[in-house]
Image (tube, rainbow, N blue to C red):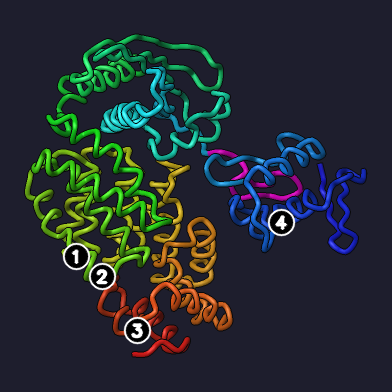
């Protein structure tokens, strides 16, 4: 099928036949057609097509539905949690989902909350996250990160489509019921392509035994996929995150707030919850690590200064000295101590240990890749960051992953490719200041001075007292070429020394 658009007459022709489209629908199609080599975010479409107007996301959904009726349901691909990509009339780079690997691969979808109380969502989600993490520690499986699978929460999904979008062979579904202090977890393992149910089971226990239930479910799913696998201590060897369930619940509530980097009030609320968790359990390693991650995020977005972000250094030291086997705790604290604490080799060692403990974590691969960026191990950085995208293709921090790839490409001297990746990352996450700073340098070096100045104006609004010396003092990258490129661009854009 061939799609032709005439921007002068604002007309569309599909296989020689004219299409009847409304003005907004044409604008959406035109923008998707011009950017058919990538996924276009919903916010980008809203800002472009409805420029200057405040509209709801539902307006975009209406136009997408109209276009699919006109040009075919499969002509526009939805990438959950991100946006859309035109798969007709172009040769997109990512029109097809990830290739299903030869090794057993699975995704654990969000479980249905049948407890009768919506405010228990955080507990249900926490159980699913822990089950996913436990399965991810088994090297025999490729397990998609919960950060991607939770984009399907609250939606009626087609299992075959989920399998194609995430590139997995199997999908785990489930639900959780509650009566008084009892929990009942239903799970089933489904072959994504055929919808054939391979295994199902039910697990009962007290709310206080939630950690044992999580381990039991994870072990049973693994056994169904690979009967010959000897589990031994397997999942149970990872241990419980804390004996204090109240602190655990506070930590569950805090995690998504600390991860949301679009507003400083989310960060403040999340850190307050973590503070309360640590009052209940001062030795709660995972809570300390999440505090570190919050401080990392606060500086990466430039909501806080570098000096403010250093406040969590004692927590990072305590996590790394604890001997923990919690891969995410090692990941958060290890990256923080490299990024903010400038203890690069120690941070690298912590992240490499986290990778051994959980080889299927997109977040571990992402932050390990960034530490390699700091150390100018550019090829290793790109390999880790590309693996992060494979492990978690719908990761909410996909812009952080792409920004790391762009940084490594810039350090390798491939500025054109770096600009493309930085632009993609900026569209995915406008608040991530590291991408904006990188774009200033790359644009200036490529002679794209007006675009560099546009980024510089954004940075001035975000960080009014930004100087070249501030950049030099707070940058974690070892690369002298990167340092020189950004410094020259900042001076050229009028930032004081």
Classify 238 as above or below 214.
below
Q: Residues within 10 Å of mark 4 (few under 14, many from 20)?
A: some
**Closer mark to the observer between disc 4 and disc 1:** 1
Q: Earlier in the sequence, mark 4 or mark 2?
A: 4
Within the magenta stretch, is there residue 96? yes
Q: Residue at x 16, y 19 (%)?
A: 232
Question: Percent position (x, y) of residue 10?
Answer: 86, 57
Q: Quadrant of the N terminus?
A: top right
Q: CB under 8 Å between callouts 4 and 2? A: no
- At mark 4, the secondary structure is helix
**Closer mark to the observer between disc 4 and disc 3:** 3
Q: CB under 8 Å between callouts 2 and 3? A: no
Distance from the alpha carbon under mark 1 to that under mark 3: 20 Å
Distance from the alpha carbon under mark 1 to that under mark 2: 7 Å
Q: Earlier in the sequence, mark 1 or mark 3?
A: 1
Q: Quadrant of residue 487?
A: bottom left
Judge left or right: residue 208 versus residue 461: left
Q: Quadrant of the C terminus?
A: bottom left
Q: Earlier in the sequence, mark 4 or mark 1?
A: 4
Q: CB under 8 Å between callouts 1 and 2? A: yes
Q: Residue at x 53, y 64 (%)?
A: 423
Distance from the alpha carbon under mark 4 to that under mark 2: 39 Å
| Residue 353 appears in the picture as rendered | no
Q: Residue at x 61, y 52 (%)?
A: 40
Within the magenta stretch, is there residue 468? no
Magenta stretch bounds: 84-97
Distance from the alpha carbon under mark 2 to that under mark 3: 13 Å
Q: Which mark is residue 306?
A: 2
């Amino acid at each position: 099928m061939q799609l032709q658009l005439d921007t002068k007459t604002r007309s569309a022709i599909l296989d020689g036949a004219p299409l009847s489209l409304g003005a907004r629908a044409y604008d959406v199609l035109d923008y998707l057609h011009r950017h058919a080599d990538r996924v276009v975010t919903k916010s980008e479409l809203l800002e472009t097509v409805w420029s200057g107007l405040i509209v709801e996301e539902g307006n975009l959904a209406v136009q997408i539905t109209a276009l699919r009726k006109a040009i075919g349901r499969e002509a526009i691909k939805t990438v959950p949690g991100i946006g859309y990509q035109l798969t007709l009339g172009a040769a997109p780079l990512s029109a097809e989902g990830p290739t299903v690997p030869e090794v057993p691969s699975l995704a654990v979808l969000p479980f249905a909350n049948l407890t009768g109380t919506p405010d228990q969502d955080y507990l249900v989600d926490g159980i699913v996250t822990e089950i996913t993490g436990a399965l991810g520690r088994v090297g025999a499986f490729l397990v998609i990160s919960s950060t991607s699978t939770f984009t399907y929460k609250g939606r009626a999904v087609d299992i075959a489509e989920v399998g194609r979008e995430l590139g997995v062979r199997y999908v785990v579904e489930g639900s959780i019921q509650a009566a008084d202090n009892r929990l009942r977890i239903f799970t089933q393992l489904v072959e994504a392509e055929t919808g054939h149910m391979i295994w199902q089971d039910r697990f009962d226990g007290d709310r206080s035994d939630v950690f044992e239930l999580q381990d039991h479910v994870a072990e049973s799913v693994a056994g169904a996929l690979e009967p010959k696998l000897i589990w031994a201590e397997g999942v149970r060897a990872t241990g419980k995150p804390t004996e204090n369930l109240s602190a655990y619940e506070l930590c569950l509530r805090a995690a998504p707030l600390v991860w949301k980097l679009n507003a400083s009030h989310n960060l403040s609320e999340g850190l307050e919850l973590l503070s309360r968790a640590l009052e209940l359990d001062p030795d709660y390693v995972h809570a300390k690590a999440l505090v570190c991650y919050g401080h990392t995020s606060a500086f990466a977005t430039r909501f806080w200064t570098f000096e403010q972000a250093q406040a969590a250094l004692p927590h990072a030291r305590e996590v790394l000295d604890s001997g923990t086997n919690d891969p995410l705790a090692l990941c958060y604290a290890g990256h923080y101590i490299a990024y903010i604490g400038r203890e690069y080799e120690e941070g690298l060692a912590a992240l490499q240990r986290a990778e051994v403990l959980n080889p299927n974590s997109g977040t571990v691969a992402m932050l390990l890749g960034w530490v390699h960026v700091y150390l100018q191990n550019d090829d290793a950085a790109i390999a880790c960051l590309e693996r992060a995208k494979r492990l978690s293709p719908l990761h909410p921090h996909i812009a952080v992953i792409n920004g790391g790839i762009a940084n490594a490409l810039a350090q390798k001297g491939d500025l054109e490719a770096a600009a493309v990746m930085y632009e993609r990352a900026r569209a995915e996450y406008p608040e991530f200041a590291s991408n904006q700073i990188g774009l200033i340098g790359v644009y200036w070096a490529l002679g794209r001075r007006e675009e560099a100045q546009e980024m510089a104006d954004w940075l001035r609004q975000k960080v009014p007292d930004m100087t070249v010396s501030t950049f030099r003092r707070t940058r974690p990258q070892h690369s002298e070429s990167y340092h020189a490129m950004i410094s020259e661009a900042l001076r050229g854009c009028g930032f004081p020394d």
